[in-house]
Image (tube, rainbow, N blue to C red):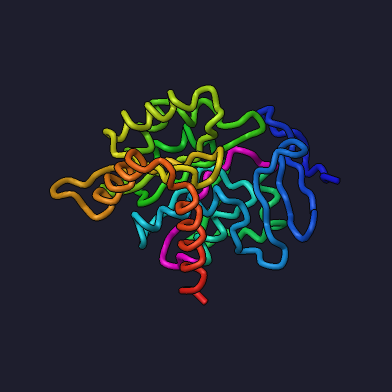
Amino acid sequence: MPLPVGQPAANGNGGALLSRRKGRLTLEFAPGEVQSQMDLADPHRLVLAYARAMMCFVLFKPRPAHIVMVGLGGGSLAKFCHHYLPDARITVLELSADVIALREHFAVPPDNDRFRVIHADAARHMPQLAGTADVLLVDGFDASGLPPALGSARFYADCRRALRPDGLLVANIFSYDPNYHAMANRLRQAFGGHVCQFRGIAGNNHILFALRPAAGAPTRACRLVQRVALCGALWPGLAPFNRLLAHWIVGRLRQTAA
């Protein structure tokens, strides 16, 4: 049975629920609504498909110096990047004190010179990061889904400014969110159409990659965004290949670090 952890958050999103089932530690905001999972026998393994899909950012930015994450959750992505991208500095913005309080349960590293969790509203904090991030991972869900502020035109514009030239934003948006198309359009407008996705890579979790182009000739990342967008338009049935691609990328990172 889920075990309630802490009290309802001050923002009204409710407390986090922690449960252990079949060798996995699960974080939920409501019973059955899985936010994050950890394999207790292999804490660094990415259990959920959407997390593996978001790690495809290394195709575009293989050696980021600074990764900023919106949303800690169970820390799967933060922990994975900390362990398998040792040259990257990682900053995590998390609104819920209840979620931050669970970091030790999920073996999230303590704060140090290259890893930091900040208790902050990402929509308000983002302007402070202008020109500092190479990769920005937006996965800030609460009990009601993706907060409207994290899908607004203002937020995407702030995200673009937070990125260095040739920096990449990765956004996780539910396909069944009634505001999905509006958010996707705002993202394209903020990034001048430099947006792509690997279709079907994580089911109802649509993972969008948006690049802030550097001045001058197109970079490798810019050309790859264009290529992935074109492939998705010409061959929409690439979902099985894309899922295998995410598995391969994650497996390669783990093997290289072994």
Please tell me how many numbered marks the rendered image carries: 0
Q: Nearer the viewer, residue 232 or 196?
A: 232
**For residue 25, above or below residue 42:** above
Whether residue 84 is visible: yes
Q: Nearer the viewer, residue 168 or 23?
A: 23
User: In the rendering, at what x and y percent does residue 120 appear?
Assistant: 54, 39
Q: Residue at horizontal 70%, vertical 38%?
A: 33
Residue 152 magenta-highlighted: no
Question: Residue 107, located in which quarter of the rendered image?
Answer: bottom right
Q: Residue at horizontal 48%, vertical 50%?
A: 54
User: In the rendering, at what x and y percent does residue 220 appear?
Assistant: 24, 55
Residue 90 magenta-highlighted: yes
**For residue 173, above or below residue 27:** above
Q: Nearer the viewer, residue 216 or 113?
A: 216
User: In the rendering, at what x and y percent does residue 36 appear?
Assistant: 65, 48
Whether residue 162 is visible: no
Q: Residue at horizontal 62%, vertical 46%?
A: 73
Q: Left or right? Give the position of 233 relative to 240.
A: left
Q: Residue at horizontal 64%, vertical 28%?
A: 144
Question: Residue 230, located in which quarter of the rendered image?
Answer: top left
Q: Left or right? Give the position of 156 relative to 72.
A: left
User: In the rendering, at what x and y percent does residue 210 appear?
Assistant: 35, 41
Magenta-colored span: 84-98
Residue sitting farthest toward the right: 1
Residue sitting farthest toward the left: 216
